[in-house]
Image (cartoon, rainbow, N blue to C red):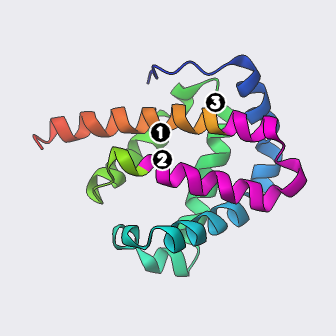
Amino acid sequence: MNTTKVISQQTINIVKSTAPILKQQGQKITTRMYEILFHNYPEVKAQFDLSAQANASQPAKLATAVYSYATHIDDLEALKAMVDQIAHRHVKTQVLPEQYPIVGECLLLAIKDVLGNAATEEVMTAWTEAYEALAEVFINREQQIYQNQGV
């Protein structure tokens, strides 16, 4: 599961250092991210199972995924099964590569909102770099799935 973006060691260290707070505040962050996403980009709502929003299962799943990424950012092979599962779901709901920056923007805003002063410029820069690298992993994996389906 290679990414062409190389994540700096500093980013890896910072992201890993945020894992405990993500474990604690993760669902608050992802719930906030969906609020921002649906407010700023209402057109994407159709791609989501809104019942999974209402019962908080979707924010919980995303929180687990973000925490797992923070924990294993330097060992993406450990995330292969999770990435595959999410990538297949994204293909099923027709997530497009150009939607990743939108989600990234909303996730970063939510991290900043929830973490407040703990979301230093250094932390936000690291998470921006980390998100972009992960988005590339998903985009590449989803492209493979589409190609295998002959789409």
Residue at image mark 1: 135
Mark 1 near mark 3, Cβ–Cβ under 8 Å? no
Instruction: Indicate the position of residue 63 as horizontal and vertical percent values.
Output: 63, 56
Q: Nearer the viewer, mark 3 or mark 2?
A: 2
Q: Is 35 one of the magenta-colored residues?
A: no
Q: Quadrant of the N terminus?
A: top left
Find residue 143 and report its image quarter. Answer: top left
Q: Nearer the viewer, residue 2 or 122?
A: 122
Query: Residue type at mark 2?
Result: Pro
In the image, taking residue 52 as reference, residue 73 lies left or right, namely: right
Residue at image mark 2: 101
Q: Main SS type for the magenta part?
A: helix
Mark 2 or mark 1: name the one nearer the start of the chain. 2
Query: Range of the magenta residues?
Result: 100-127
Residue at image mark 3: 73
Q: Nearer the viewer, mark 1 or mark 3?
A: 1
Seen at 82% across and 56% down, the residue is 115
Find residue 72 and report its image quarter. Answer: top right
In the image, taking residue 148 as reference, residue 27 lies left or right, namely: right
Q: Which residue extends farthest left?
A: 150
| SS class, disc 1 | helix
Q: Is 121 one of the magenta-colored residues?
A: yes
Figure check: 25 above or below 81: below
Mark 3 or mark 2: name the one nearer the start of the chain. 3
Mark 2 near mark 1, Cβ–Cβ under 8 Å? yes
